[in-house]
Each structure stands twice: as structure tokens, then as C-alpha cells.
Image: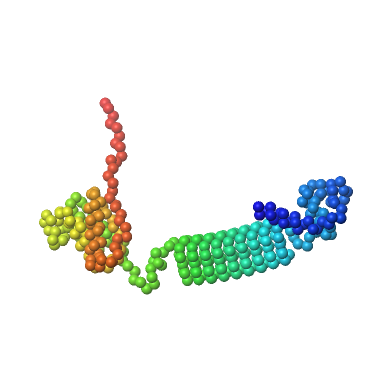
């Protein structure tokens, strides 16, 4: 519809050029334009007739239907102003060059769709300001260079998704950057829970696997003798290790559970650890980040070769 409207507008502009009393060029006329009029369509014959009436052609370069002002050159349909050059559909102002659809202002160069201001160069879709260069989608300010999606400020370089500021380089999202400035870095640990029959072993290690503290039901003062095999022995052991983890300064733990038993028993140990860690501070958030069951599932193994009958 847009192309049809532009075509009709172009024909409307060309109609006043042919006066009613001017001789009409026909295919039977003998002249230097006989070959062109014979091979062209009615629109081409109308253009040649108008060019003959204006003694040499049009004052501006006009490749197809469209509008151009101020002596600009246009390769396709669209609008251009102020001597701008445009290779496709779109709008350009102030002598800017554009290779595709989009908008550009202030003499900027753009290779794809998007917006650019202040003479910036952009290789793909996105926004760039202040002469910044961008290789992909995203936003960059202050002349920063960015190789992928994300945000960068103050001339920082970024190789992947994430956030970087003040000239830093980031290959992926760094969780440490989300921590408030000046806040102490919290310790992280791993809670190893092992259930063997009626026995429960709880161990706290660091992220590298070094043992920090450990306990079992037999280590508790009130769980000596046969009471260490009671139903609540595992929950009491987990609560004891929660208090120990709070004393050594752990802020978050990852729970790894191992043992052939119902998860209800494992859940009691985990909830006991959380209660012991909080203590009387009820509003303290739980230190448990996630729970991972690392129990190896039993299988029958490879099938043995069939015995040969004799």
C-alpha cells in the first residue's frame, strides 16, 4: 500500500510537466527516442516526454518513486532531507548516511536498524550515544565498546552478557557485583548429611571440601547409649550443627544429602539445622541455598554373558 501510494504521488508530480498542447510521442514517430519509446511502458514514455519538454531532464537525481528535498540522492522509496544519502527505506537528516531501515541524525553512520545520535557508529540493532561503537544489541554510553548484549558505562569493555562499569571487563554475570559496596563478604559452606540406617552423620565443610566441623547422634550429651538411635536423634544432630555453623561465621550453605531412606528423615535433619542456625532470631532468613540429593541409585549392572549349555 505504501509503495502504491508513493507511485501515485510520483505520477501526480509528473502530470503537470506535460502540457495539453504538446505533441505526444508515439511508437510510429520517427526520431532519436524511437527505440526507448518502443521498449518502455506507458510510465517510461511519460517520463521521456516530460524530459523532452524540460530540455534535458530533471534537476535532481531520482531513482524511483519517492520524495527528496535539497538535492539529496535516494536509492529507494522513502524520505530524505538536507542532501542526505539513503540506501533503503527510512528517514535521514543532516547529511547522514544510512545502509538500512531506521533513523539517523547528526551525520551518523548506521549499518542496520536502530537509532544513533551524535555521529556514532553502530553495527547492529540498538542504541548508542556520544560516538560509541557497538557490535551487537544493547546500550552503550560515553564512547564505550561492547561485543555482546548488555550494558556498559564509562568506556568499559564487555565480552559477554553482564554489567560492567568504569572500564572493567566482564566475561559473564558476576554475582559479587550485586553485593553492596563496603558490605562484608559472607562465608559459604557445604552441609554434608549422611544417613546410614538409624545413624546420622552431619559435617560442615568449605566449598573446597575441607572439613570444618562434624557431629553425630552419639556426640550429643543427651543422646548417649541407645538414645542415639531414637527417632529425633537426627533432628537434634542437625540443630546442634546449625549452632556450630552460626558460631564459625557461615552465612549460607549448600546441603548435600546422602543415604537410602525416606526423604522425610532427611528433611527433619535439614529443618533442624535451620532452626539451630537461627536460634532465638526468628526473623533471620534461612542459610540454606538449595538441597542436593547425591545418593547413588542402585542398578543391576551389566548383563552377564549367557552360559553355554553342554
The residue most toward the bottom is: 182
The residue most toward the right is: 30
User: Does the rendering let one see residue 242?
Assistant: no
Quadrant of res 83? bottom right
Residue 115 x %, y %: 58, 64
Looking at the picture, the colour scheme in use is rainbow
Residue 54 x %, y %: 83, 59
- Left or right: residue 189 versus residue 200 is right
Residue at position x 65%, y 52% in the image: 1
- Left or right: residue 288 versus residue 95 is left
Query: Between residues 79 and 107, which one lies in front from this camera angle?
Result: 79
Quadrant of res 254? bottom left
Q: Say if 214 sits above or below 31 in the image.
A: below
Residue at position x 23%, y 57% in the image: 269
User: Does the rendering let one see residue 78?
Assistant: yes
The residue most toward the left is: 225
Amino acid at each position: 500500500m505504501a509503495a502504491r501510494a508513493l507511485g501515485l504521488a510520483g505520477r501526480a508530480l509528473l502530470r503537470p510537466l506535460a502540457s495539453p498542447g504538446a505533441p505526444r510521442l508515439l511508437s510510429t514517430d520517427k526520431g532519436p527516442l524511437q527505440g526507448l519509446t518502443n521498449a518502455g511502458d506507458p510510465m517510461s514514455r511519460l517520463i521521456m516526454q516530460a524530459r523532452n519538454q524540460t530540455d534535458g531532464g530533471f534537476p535532481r537525481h531520482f531513482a524511483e518513486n519517492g520524495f527528496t528535498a535539497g538535492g539529496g540522492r535516494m536509492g529507494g522509496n522513502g524520505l530524505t532531507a538536507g542532501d542526505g544519502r539513503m540506501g533503503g527505506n527510512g528517514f535521514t537528516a543532516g547529511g547522514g548516511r544510512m545502509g538500512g531501515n531506521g533513523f539517523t541524525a547528526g551525520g551518523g553512520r548506521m549499518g542496520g536498524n536502530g537509532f544513533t545520535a551524535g555521529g556514532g557508529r553502530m553495527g547492529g540493532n540498538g542504541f548508542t550515544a556520544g560516538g560509541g561503537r557497538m557490535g551487537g544489541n544493547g546500550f552503550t554510553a560515553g564512547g564505550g565498546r561492547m561485543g555482546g548484549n548488555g550494558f556498559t558505562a564509562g568506556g568499559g569493555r564487555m565480552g559477554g552478557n553482564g554489567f560492567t562499569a568504569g572500564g572493567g571487563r566482564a566475561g559473564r554475570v558476576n554475582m559479587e557485583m550485586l553485593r553492596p559496596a563496603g558490605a562484608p563478604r559472607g562465608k559459604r559452606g557445604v552441609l554434608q548429611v549422611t544417613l546410614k540406617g538409624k545413624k546420622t552423620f552431619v559435617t560442615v565443610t568449605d566449598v573446597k571440601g575441607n572439613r570444618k566441623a562434624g557431629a553425630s547422634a552419639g556426640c550429643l550429651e543427651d543422646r548417649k547409649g541407645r538414645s542415639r538411635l531414637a527417632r529425633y536423634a537426627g533432628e537434634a544432630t542437625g540443630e546442634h550443627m546449625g549452632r556450630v555453623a552460626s558460631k564459625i561465621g557461615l552465612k549460607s550453605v549448600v546441603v548435600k544429602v546422602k543415604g537410602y531412606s525416606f526423604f522425610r528423615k532427611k528433611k527433619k535433619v535439614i529443618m533442624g539445622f535451620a532452626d539451630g542456625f537461627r536460634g532465638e532470631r526468628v526473623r533471620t532468613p534461612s542459610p540454606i541455598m538449595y538441597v542436593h540429593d547425591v545418593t547413588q541409585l542402585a542398578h543391576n549392572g551389566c548383563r552377564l554373558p549367557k552360559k553355554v549349555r553342554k
